[in-house]
């Protein structure tokens, strides 16, 4: 299983909004730039992520923006709130960082921010972290996820080596949420429309019913925690895919905001691993 490496000692990066784009009805791309991105250490992985910092309205944190100082001097309820987002693309020559946001109206924190973002707006974030990129030595690649995994899946598709065989299964709400990708790989994309079905239901069924090609697979499976749990069981137990050939984790969980999910994620992972160990024996 690919290790998601963070850069916890790196101070927050300050960037500014260059432009925004509504790429589908429920996906907004915010392109960040500015001198604060000079030397930004992204590019090794296709699942790079950053941790956006949203300050509390009406609170002046002063300059320089230092999280350690803020946490020492301000009450916890005034600390900036963190939201994690995958880097869709990093262009060091243009010094542009693309971040795609799932948008569901006024729900949540980051989506509405992305919808209302204007050129010149300042944003701070930690990272990047990451741990996965398509293995050029794999016989084929499996990419599976919901909307939250789409940016990383898109980045991986664009990184595929020439002729690399890959099958991507992507669940979205409907056909107007499809996106176009450019790839040098031998790519097959299966779009799954959720409609009124539960999150992950059609994705899990499609991957379960898929006739896996022969050879060593390198798999990237991310999205809602419930669907990830089912696909992890399929890959680890039914298909007997070794951990080192998997990057698989829940990006979010139904009924939880990011704070709640991150607080319970370690325990959730331990429970899943215990279940797998019990069933393996």
Image: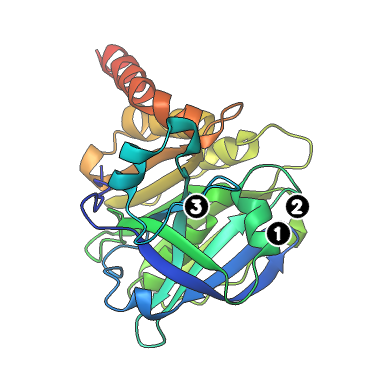
Against 210, residue 215 (above or below) is below
User: Where is residue 228 shown, x and y percent of the image?
Assistant: 46, 34
Badge 3 local density, few (<14 within 10 Å), some, or many (20+)?
Answer: few
- Residue at coordinates 21% horizontally, 63% vertically from top-left? 137
- Residue at coordinates 64% horizontally, 66% vertically from top-left? 117
Q: Quadrant of the C terminus?
A: top left
The residue that mark 3 highlights is 60
Q: Nearer the viewer, mark 1 or mark 3?
A: 3
Q: Is 66 left, or right, of 209 in this rendering?
A: left
Q: Is 55 left, or right, of 74 in this rendering?
A: right
Considering only order in the chain, which callout, 2 or 3, is on the residue closer to the N terminus? Answer: 3
The residue that mark 2 highlights is 174
Residue 232 visible (yes or no) = yes
Distance between the alpha carbons at the discs numbered 2 and 1: 6 Å
Distance between the alpha carbons at the discs numbered 1 and 3: 38 Å
User: Where is residue 70 shown, x and y percent of the image?
Assistant: 36, 44
Distance between the alpha carbons at the discs numbered 3 and 2: 42 Å
User: Where is residue 55 shown, x and y percent of the image?
Assistant: 51, 49
Q: Are marks 2 and 1 in contact (CB under 8 Å)?
A: yes
Mark 1: secondary structure: helix
Tag on residue 119? none
Q: Are marks 3 and 2 in contact (CB under 8 Å)?
A: no
Against 279, residue 154 (above or below) is below
Q: Pick out the residue farthest to the right.
A: 196
Q: Nearer the viewer, mark 3 or mark 2?
A: 3
Residue 157 visible (yes or no) = no
Which sits in the foreground, 143 or 119? 119
The residue that mark 1 highlights is 177
Considering only order in the chain, which callout, 3 or 1, is on the residue closer to the N terminus? Answer: 3
Mark 2: secondary structure: loop
């Amino acid at each position: 299983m690919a290790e998601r490496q963070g850069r916890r000692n790196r101070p927050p990066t300050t960037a500014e909004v260059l432009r925004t784009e509504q790429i589908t009805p429920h996906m907004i791309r915010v392109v960040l730039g500015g001198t604060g991105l000079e030397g930004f250490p992204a590019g090794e992985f296709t699942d790079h992520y950053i941790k956006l910092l949203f300050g509390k309205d009406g609170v002046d944190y002063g300059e320089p923006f230092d999280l350690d100082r803020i946490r020492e001097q301000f009450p916890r309820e005034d600390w900036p709130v963190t939201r994690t987002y995958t880097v869709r693309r990093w262009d060091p020559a243009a010094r542009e960082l693309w971040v795609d946001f799932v948008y569901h109206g006024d729900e949540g924190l980051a989506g509405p921010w992305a919808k209302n973002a204007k050129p010149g707006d300042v944003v701070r974030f930690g990272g990047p972290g990451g741990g996965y990129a398509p293995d050029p030595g794999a016989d084929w690649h499996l990419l599976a996820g919901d909307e939250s995994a789409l940016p990383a899946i898109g980045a991986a598709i664009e990184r595929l080596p020439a002729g690399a065989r890959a099958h991507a299964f992507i669940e979205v709400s409907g056909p107007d949420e499809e996106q176009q990708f450019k790839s040098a790989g031998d790519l097959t994309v299966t779009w799954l429309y959720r409609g009124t079905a539960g999150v992950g239901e059609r994705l899990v069924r499609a991957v379960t019913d898929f006739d896996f090609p022969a050879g060593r697979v390198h798999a990237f499976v991310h999205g809602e925690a419930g669907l990830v749990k089912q696909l992890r069981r399929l890959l680890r137990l039914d298909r007997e895919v070794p951990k080192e050939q998997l990057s698989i984790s829940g990006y979010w969980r139904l009924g939880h905001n990011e704070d709640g999910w991150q607080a319970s994620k370690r325990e959730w992972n331990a429970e899943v691993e215990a279940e797998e160990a019990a069933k393996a024996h």
